[in-house]
Amino acid sequence: MKYSRTPALPSRLPQVGTTIFTVMSALATECGAVNLGQGFPDFDCDPRLLDMVNQAMREGLNQYPPMPGVPALRAAVGAKIEALYGHRYDADSEITITAGATQAILTALLCCVHPGDEVIVLEPCYDSYAPGIELAGGTVVRVALTPRSFRPDFAAIEAVLSPRTRAIIVNSPHNPSATVWTRAEMQRLAALLVPTDVLLISDEVYEHMVFDGAAHVSASSIPELARRSFVVSSFGKTYHVTGWKVGTVAAPAPLTAEFRKVHQFNVFTVNTPMQHGLCRYMADPAPYLGLPRFYERKRDLFAAGLASTRLKPLRTAGTYFQCVDYSAVSQLPEAQFCQWLTREVGVAAIPLSAFYEGGFEQGIVRLCFAKREQTLRLALDRLLKV
Ligand SMILES: Cc1ncc(COP(=O)(O)O)c(C=O)c1O
């Protein structure tokens, strides 16, 4: 052969391109816009947490930890779940530390989905779910949450349940709509699933951001769900360290055993000093118990400011996202409106249509309020001109 060339590679994920988050963040930088698009805090974490991780490094805790995670951290996570949601997971056989929630969800899908299985997702949904299902050889079955209210449509979910359904992914508090499932809704889900062998992947990364005195309803708190669930959370969201990528999965022992088979050959372990630092920091529950109040203040400041603009804020019951209806301002499709808002107004947002496969249009965009007060005020000043 004359030339050697890179072999052609048929894509495992032919539909996947650059995500809207990357596109909008790049545009925000290019235009000098306030980036309320991608969901991450623009403030730092508690310096005590940094000290604790630093201390762990200096103590020489820098080699491989046990495959499922540092035992003391797993015990602390188990104790927290029991205290908050009343379900006792065995730290040795039922809790695993992961490289963030994204890896946890992918690993859960890889361990339970067989080629030909169906997995239900409720749109709009986080962008990693569908590619994860496809990589596992499964078929994505999309059910829309009720437009505008974003409440689950149980009749529609029931209509797609079949003997091929392996799992359903539920996310509450919900990105992007900022809604929170009620206990009654979680119980209806349980009633639907009880006669089936369908597994639940419960994405609870915003578990500590539920507002107005409401309580987060974890799948672990409902026995009929707990026994079929992978309950996923993320320290990144809870402790303002999204770049650390440390998460957790709690699941009954037989599910955890299968999960760990994949985890072991996927990441094997998650970085050691972070785990020790997080474990020490968790000894004080105040940071996560105080999170609703912390984010409620930002939500209220931002929503009060938005009330003076022509954008109509939807109710945020949880997460650090604020959806706004822009139909009084523009008839542009959501993605084009976000481009315009970034370029002309100087505020980056994310179109809700990006969270639907077919690009469903509702005239709603998502803004992130996990920002310093000065950042939110600057964005509000600009949005007043819309
Ligand atoms: C609903 C949802 N699930 C999972 C994740 C991923 O979390 P992690 O950064 O821990 O992988 C995010 C992050 O934005 C999210 O919004």
Image: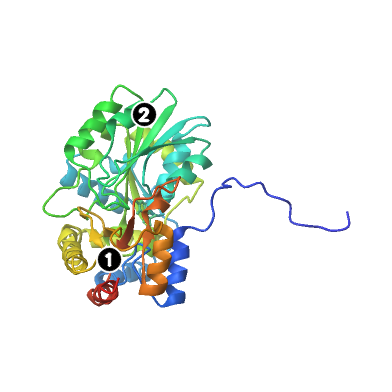
Figure quadrant of residue 342: bottom left
Q: Is residue 188 left or right of residue 159?
A: left
Image height check: is 90 above or below 352?
A: above
Q: Quadrant of ligand 1?
A: bottom left
Q: Which element carries disc 1, helix, strand or loop? A: loop
Quadrant that contains the C terminus: bottom left
How far from the left and from the top, in percent, is residue 245? 39, 59
Percent position of residue 238, x then y: 27, 59
Q: What element carries label 2?
A: loop
Ligand 1 within 8 Å, label 1 CB: no
Q: Position of residue 54 (x, y in %)?
A: 34, 71
Q: How far apart are marks 1 and 2 (CA)?
A: 35 Å
Residue 198 is labelled as 2
Residue type indicated by callout 2: Val
Of residues 359 and 231, the one nearer the viewer is 359
Residue occupied by mark 1: 370
Q: Which residue lies furthest to the right in this view?
A: 2
N-terminal of the pair, mark 1 or mark 2, is 2
Look at 74% across and 56% down and name the residue there.
6
Q: For residue 169, what is the image quadrant? A: top left
| Dot 2 alpha-carbon crowd within 10 angstroms: few under 14, some 14 to 19, many 20 or more | many
Residue contact between numbered discs 1 and 2, judged by CB atoms under 8 Å: no
